Image: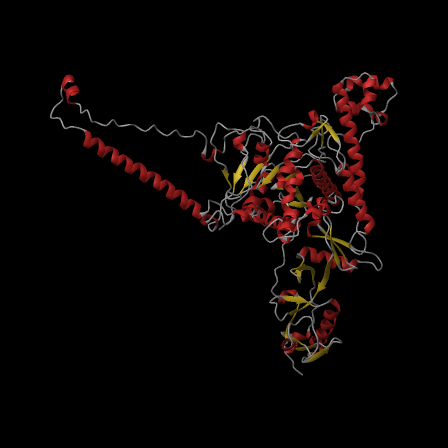
């Protein structure tokens, strides 16, 4: 027997690490949990009681792992559960450079054989498995797996591969794998991200969930790099980003729109027509009163649901919330924020978690006097009390009933708006219970739950008549049909007041102009949101500016977003330097030519002539020299940072432009589509958001070392 020394006779149990399986491109990829999450799973397994389900929150609370099932479930969005394993032994695939984990029973047998070999000092041990594989433990550093010839195996690609041995490794410390950093427990800020047209958000056709995951990871890395001091002092936790998906509800069975469109779609160029129906038609749907209502209701219902669920899972959260909209998603949020009601009941920025599902304009109160005071009609309380009315009976009144009580037109409209809003609250509360219904043990919602959710969405998308006077609140409302003096749209209310609204690649300016709005009042601001940033790539064909609609008398360049590593990109600095050099050279050449022309056209004189002589000797062909007016310098600071452009962003600048990369600068047309989808992976964009979010918390961002 081979004895490699007495030091090998001491057996140390293998340190396990937990992995989860992610399927991509028809292949399974095993990814490690962070060390913190893996440790939590291991401790939960040790403390688990027989017959009792143990659920562990992982990845910042966005996924729950059910240990007995070895499955990982998404918390905030619909996603098929993924397999979870406690991994100790790994093998290297034939065509895959990565090490893959063995199943737990297989690993347990390998560990037992390894323990015996180490304890007894006996190597060259052979371990045969019922499936035909053979593992030979040559020594602690050399362990191989062999496939028998002719054994069908899904792991190999051809019969010749079956005789090729596989390298086997024990423990995660012996394989090359990148373990992700753990996330801080404390959440400082919550951001909801709304997508644009279509189900795909980038050129890789990834969903909003995948894109938001990348944005979240980039933001976490930037906080680690730029807030080292504040994080060490415990003043910085993390920002949570949650995706808001409205496309699935619009194109789902609840609306039936896809089935209706398919009936009238021509059979030719089917792939292009499918892309058009699934993506570009979203623009037309939003300009339709019926489907616009569906989109608006879905977005607000989903945001409120996510907010309520987040607060229930993070009861200690006291931060603020912000909104991000990409492309059409930014227009949806702009219209919603324009039509939010600023209620005097809101003395805090947002409601407590227990009230997170209630409406932002009217709290769930049963007192008639308080309800009437909310809408400024306290002078009519006595009239209602004479009729023995309470709040419930008031909510049953029609406009004809209110007119019979002698109430003027204005108060009648306000009361009817109150009635309509409270009905929405009741429907949303009923529907919220549906959305918060847990999935069954199989990992999917049962058909009854699915049908219930779809029925709720269908009910929410039913249009209701709203008086045009009350619909036209703020600026830039959607231009929709008016029937009998009324419009069929209703703007639902968010459960909180957002801290800031960030628009990525936004067509807001274009839509406002098309709707007939040529100028935004500089004094206008969103009723419930005081911050607004319009962020765009210079080559984005969908993006438009906002500031020229507010300060048309100033020719302001947009604010240039700094590179996340500091300073301007090298090729842009070179471009600016060449521009300045060209301008200086042009001025010098023109100055020299002007001086030469003057010397050529001036006659020489020996002495000072008299006035009459000077007049007589003046050449009739002399060309007068026209002096160029001096260029007026802008009094504002560089880039116009201190210019006040209105109250839409609290008096601060609104338009912010990214710096194009060197390769993009070669051909702006070639990268036009990519530039509209670049924001999800843009660290410059993420850093701008983080700086704005943490500015109110007094956190100073540092420039990381190069």
| Colouring rule applied to residues | secondary structure
Across and down, in percent, residue 418 comes to 77, 27
Placement of the N terminus among the 4 image quadrants:
bottom right
Q: Nearer the viewer, residue 124 or 595?
A: 595
Picture layout, residue 437 above or below residue 613: below
Query: Seen in the image, is 704 located left or right of residue 248?
Result: left
Give the residue at the far bottom of this rendering.
1
Across and down, in percent, residue 270 comes to 64, 53
Picture layout, residue 573 above or below residue 30: above
Q: Nearer the viewer, residue 332 or 211?
A: 332
Picture layout, residue 102 above or below residue 193: below
Across and down, in percent, residue 333 comes to 65, 37
Residue located at (31% from left, 36% from top): 587
Query: Seen in the image, is 607 located left or right of residue 147?
Result: left
Q: Nearer the viewer, residue 196 or 65?
A: 196
Residue located at (69% from left, 50% from top): 60
Res 19 quadrant in image: bottom right
Give the residue at the far left of this rendering.
606
Across and down, in percent, residue 208 comes to 65, 48
Q: Is residue 122 visible?
A: no
Q: Is residue 394 visible?
A: yes
Query: Seen in the image, is 592 located left or right of residue 194?
Result: left
């Amino acid at each position: 027997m081979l004895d490699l020394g007495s030091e090998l006779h001491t057996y140390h149990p293998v340190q396990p690490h937990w992995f989860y399986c992610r399927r991509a491109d028809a292949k399974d990829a095993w990814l490690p949990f962070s060390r913190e999450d893996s440790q939590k799973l291991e401790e939960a397994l040790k403390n688990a009681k027989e017959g009792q389900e143990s659920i562990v929150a992982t990845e910042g609370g966005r996924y729950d792992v059910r240990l007995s099932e070895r499955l990982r479930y998404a918390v905030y969005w619909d996603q098929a559960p993924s397999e979870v394993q406690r991994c100790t032994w790994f093998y290297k695939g034939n065509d895959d450079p990565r090490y893959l984990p063995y199943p737990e029973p297989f690993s347990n047998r390998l560990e037992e054989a390894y323990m015996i070999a180490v304890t007894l000092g006996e190597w060259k041990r052979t371990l045969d498995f019922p499936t035909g594989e053979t593992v030979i433990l040559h020594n602690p550093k050399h362990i191989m797996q062999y496939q028998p010839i002719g054994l069908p195996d899904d792991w190999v690609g051809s019969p010749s591969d079956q005789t090729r041995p596989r390298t086997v490794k024990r423990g995660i410390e012996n394989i090359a794998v990148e373990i992700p950093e753990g996330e801080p427990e404390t959440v400082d800020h919550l951001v909801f991200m709304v997508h644009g047209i279509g189900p795909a958000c980038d050129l890789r056709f990834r969903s909003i969930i995948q894109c938001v995951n990348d944005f979240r990871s980039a933001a976490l890395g930037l906080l680690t790099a730029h807030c080292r001091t504040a994080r060490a002092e415990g003043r910085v936790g993390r920002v949570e980003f949650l995706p808001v998906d409205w496309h699935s509800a619009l194109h789902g069975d609840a609306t039936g729109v896809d089935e209706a469109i398919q009936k009238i779609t021509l059979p030719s160029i089917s792939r292009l027509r499918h892309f058009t129906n699934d993506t570009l038609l979203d623009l037309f749907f939003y300009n339709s009163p019926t489907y616009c209502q569906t989109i608006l209701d879905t977005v607000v219902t989903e945001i409120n649901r996510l907010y309520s669920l987040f607060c229930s899972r993070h009861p200690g959260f006291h931060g603020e919330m912000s909104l991000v909209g990409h492309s059409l998603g930014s227009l949806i949020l702009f219209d919603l924020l324009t039509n939010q009601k600023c209620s005097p009941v809101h003395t805090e920025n947002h409601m407590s978690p227990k009230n997170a599902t209630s409406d932002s304009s009217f709290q769930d109160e049963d007192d008639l006097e308080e309800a009437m005071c909310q809408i400024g009609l306290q002078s009519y309380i006595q009239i209602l009390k004479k009729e023995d009315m309470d709040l419930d009976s008031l909510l049953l009144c029609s406009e004809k009933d209110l007119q019979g009580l002698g109430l003027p037109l204005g108060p009648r409209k306000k009361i009817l708006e109150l009635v309509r809003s409270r009905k929405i609250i009741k429907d949303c509360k009923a529907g919220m219970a549906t959305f918060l219904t847990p999935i069954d043990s199989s990992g999917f919602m049962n058909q009854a739950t699915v049908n219930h959710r779809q029925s709720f969405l269908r009910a929410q998308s039913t249009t209701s008549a709203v008086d045009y006077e009350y619909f036209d609140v703020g600026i830039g409302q959607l231009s929709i049909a008016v029937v009998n003096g009324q419009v069929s749209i209703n703007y639902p209310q968010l459960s909180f007041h957002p801290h800031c609204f960030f628009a990525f690649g936004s067509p807001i300016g274009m839509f406002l102009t098309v709707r007939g709005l040529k100028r935004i009042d500089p004094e206008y601001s969103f009723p419930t949101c005081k911050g607004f940033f319009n962020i765009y790539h210079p080559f984005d064909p969908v993006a438009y500016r906002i500031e020229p609609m507010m300060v048309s008398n100033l020719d302001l360049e947009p604010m240039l977003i700094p590179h996340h590593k500091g300073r301007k990109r090298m090729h842009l600095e070179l471009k600016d330097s060449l521009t300045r050099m060209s301008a200086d050279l042009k001025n010098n050449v023109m100055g020299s030519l002007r001086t030469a022309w003057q010397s050529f056209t001036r006659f020489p004189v020996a002495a000072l002539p008299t006035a009459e002589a000077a007049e007589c000797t003046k050449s009739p062909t002399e060309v007068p020299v026209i002096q160029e007016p001096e260029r007026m310098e802008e009094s504002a600071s560089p880039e116009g940072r201190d210019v006040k452009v209105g109250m839409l962003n609290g008096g601060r600048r609104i338009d912010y432009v990214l710096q194009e990369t060197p390769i993009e600068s070669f051909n702006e047309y070639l990268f036009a589509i990519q530039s509209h989808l670049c924001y999800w992976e843009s660290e410059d964009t993420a850093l701008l958001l983080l700086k704005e979010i943490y500015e109110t918390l007094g956190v100073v961002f540092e420039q990381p070392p190069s």
